[in-house]
Structure formats: C-alpha cells, structure tokens
Amino acid sequence: MSVFDHIIKKNSNASRKNRRSWSSRAGQHSRLCLRYASRNEYMQMNNSMNMVNNSVLETDLALLRRNAESIVRAIPAGTKLLPVLKCDAYGLGAAEIARVLEPLEAVAGFAVAHVSEGLALRNAGITKDILVMSSALPWQLSAAVEANLTLACGRAGFASELQAAAEAAGKPAAIHIKIDTGLHRIGFAPEELGGLLEELKNAPSLRVTGTFSHFSDTSDAALCAREYAVYLRALDALRAAGIEPGLRHVACSAASEQYPEYCLDAVRVGRRLFMDAPTAPRGDILEVSTWRSFVTMVHPRRAGEQIGYGGAVTLAHDALIATVGVGYGDGLNPALASAKAPVLIGGKRCTLLACCMDQCLIDVTGTDCRPGDEVVFFGYDRFGNCLPSQEVALLIGGDEGCGLTAALSPRVVRAYSS
C-alpha cells in the first residue's frame, strides 16, 4: 500500500464514491516521492497524476497517531484524550482525523465548537461521544438530541430548553456543565449555579456527564491557579446538591503541556495533536501537515524595481523572482509577506515578498528555481527539511500555527498519507 494511499478532495457536493475514485488516481503521489524525487521525476509524477490543483495541504496520519500516543505517555496515567476537532480539525479535515483517532483506547470522545460540526462527524460514521463546546441555540437542539451529541450547558434557561427537546424526541440528552472561571465567554460562576440546579430538578431527561472550564491565560501560572480554585468551588457546589460532575476537564493543549496537575479526567487537545508548542517546543510532537504549491513563473528583476500591488516591495538588489499560484484567496495571510516570511524552495529558505488574491511573489535569488518547482509554506519539503507552522505564525503575532491551517480555503485540496 502506498504511503499516500488516501488523497481526498474536499467537495461537499461530491459523493464518497467519487472522492475515492479521485483518490485512486492520485494514489502514487506518496510523501516519500514528494520528499526525495528528483525535479524531473517530481514533475513527471504530477503530469501523470493530472494534478489540477494549485496547492495541497497534506496531513501525515501516521505522524498524527504518533503524536496522540506521545501525548498519552506524557500526561498523568488514566487521563483520557478529548481531541478538539473544531473548524474542521483546524482546517485539516475533521472526518479523516476522527477516523484515525477514534480506535485509540485513550480517546474518550471528541470536542467541536458547533452543533453542525458534531452532526458532520456523526454523518462521517463517528460513534464516540461528541461534545459541542459552544452554547447551542434552541432551534439546534432537536437535531443535536437525535444525533446523541453532548451539549455544553453554560447559560440560564438552556437546561429547560434542552429538556423540552429531549422530551419531544423521547430520549435522554447529555450535558457537560460549563463553569466560567474567568474567560467570561459562556458558563456559570459558582454563585450562579443555584438557578441551574433549579432547572435540573425539572429536567428528568438530562444527564450530567461532565463538568468543564477553560483557562483564560495559560501563560500566567498564578492566574491559572486562581481559576482552577474557582472550578473546584463549582464542583463542590454541584456535589453538595447531589450532582456528580462526571468527566472533569479544564486543560487545553497548552495547559496539558505546562500543568499536569490540571489534567484531571481528560484533556482537550487540538493544536498539540498537530504541531509542537509555539514558544517552548518540547520536541515530542511533530508537525503533521504540509502546505505545498508550485512555482508558475521565474523572472529576473532589477534593483529599484517595485513588485506587487501598490509597489509593495522596492528591490534593493537585482533579484530572481518566482511567481506561485497561491494567494490570500487560498488562505495565505498577506501579513506574512510584510513579515518577509520564509518558504522552502529547492531545499532552501526563500523570502515571501508580496501576496495577491491568487498569486504571490517570492525572492529566489541565488537558486536555480524553475516553473513547476515545489513551494512549501509550512511543513516538510522533498529534501527532508521542515518549516514549522509555529515559526511562521509567530512572525505575524499568531500564537499558534493552527491559525494558519484553519484559515486555508476550500481551494486548497486536503490530502492524507499513512
């Protein structure tokens, strides 16, 4: 079996059968070939495959599994994983990611942001628990109950609304109570739980299966300790009222890396599954995704010439400029051009100069760059080099590389290797 045995074009209008047909035609486009083929072999391979897409986000599912297993070894024994697959798994493709992770014993279930995301996972065949972390709206509850989604209960009146939906469906509904410890997004402060407790007395169809919170700033250890104390007070209040908190979880990716004492019954890991910590890499998590495109034109320019809209850059020296068929319409942040972000071409770091909607311009001076050459915006090139997404994100003030992957548009084909 090829190490690139599944390439799936994201197309909501295409049937699964059609996606598999497209996949089989591209099955020889292996990660190993991408990394180590000669330039001629690489171009011949793309020609034979009918590569019509300008760029690909490739996710290595074997590395994903490795990262999950590494996290399990690093967190306290008995703590479960709750992979966060919101925003289509940060742009990587939630269904494919969930299918890889669901068989792992350490995975207790999955977390998403919205009901629609939970329904998409159910439609993809995912059967483990799915927690919707945002506050669902009344008209979304019927579908959520029918799909056996677990809903965050974090506002007054929600339990009563969900009870009505569950009663109408003739089946129970599960909730995780959200505690607001300082982020002030959704949730109950401990002193606000009285109203919820009254609602729950009149909600026989609801089952409390978890209680959770989210730290407002994991870089501040003292603040996290204060917020954790608030969470513990809320647990005490629930128990005093005869309600067991169920699955306790407060730690996100960053908290799970920094504070093992807060890992509790489960940790919600999103970014940590896909890339290392942004400012203090631990080395135990590998980049799982690569965004690649191709050079479409190479042209020499003279010192003093301006390139890009509005003369974005005035060249300080004679330069060789590569045009690449990717722009902000694909999700390439124009701020990366202002930051002179690196990209990988021909095994070397080159500089991004200007970004348009559909194309960008890169300084490839000193290389033998040619049309058709691979361009890597983050991830691995065919020479085995890695440009971490975290490094790229930090150039524009982003705190995590998942902000780059989540911004990629549907025009970037998603592909998977194993």
Image (tube, rainbow, N blue to C red):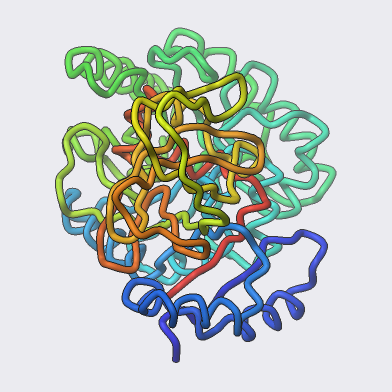
Query: Residue drawn 35% across and 25% down?
Result: 316
Which residue lies most toward the bottom here? Answer: 1
Q: Quadrant of residue 222?
A: top left
Q: Does the rendering let one see residue 418?
A: no
Residue that lies at the very extreme toward the front in this rendered image: 302
Q: Depth check: 108 or 385 in front?
A: 385
Q: Give x and y (percent) for residue 13.
A: 82, 62
Q: Give the vertical position of 252 relative to 405 (above or below).
A: above
At 35% from the left and 60% from the top, the residue drawn is: 368
Give residue 76's position: percent from left, percent from top: 17, 49
Is residue 228 visible to the viewer in this orientation of the structure? yes
User: Quadrant of the rendered structure where residue 240 is?
Assistant: top left
In which image quadrant can residue 384 be found? bottom left
Q: Is residue 312 left or right of residue 10?
A: left
Q: Residue at x 42, y 13 (%)?
A: 190
Seen in the picture, residue 107 relative to 213 is either above or below; the reply is: below
Residue lying farthest top? Answer: 191
Reply above or below: 194 against 208.
Answer: above
The quadrant the N terminus occupies is bottom left
- Residue 36 lies, in percent from the top left, at 32, 76
Residue visible at 69% across and 31% down in the picture: 136
| Figure quadrant of the C terminus | bottom left
The one of 264 and 29 positioned closer to us in this rendering: 29
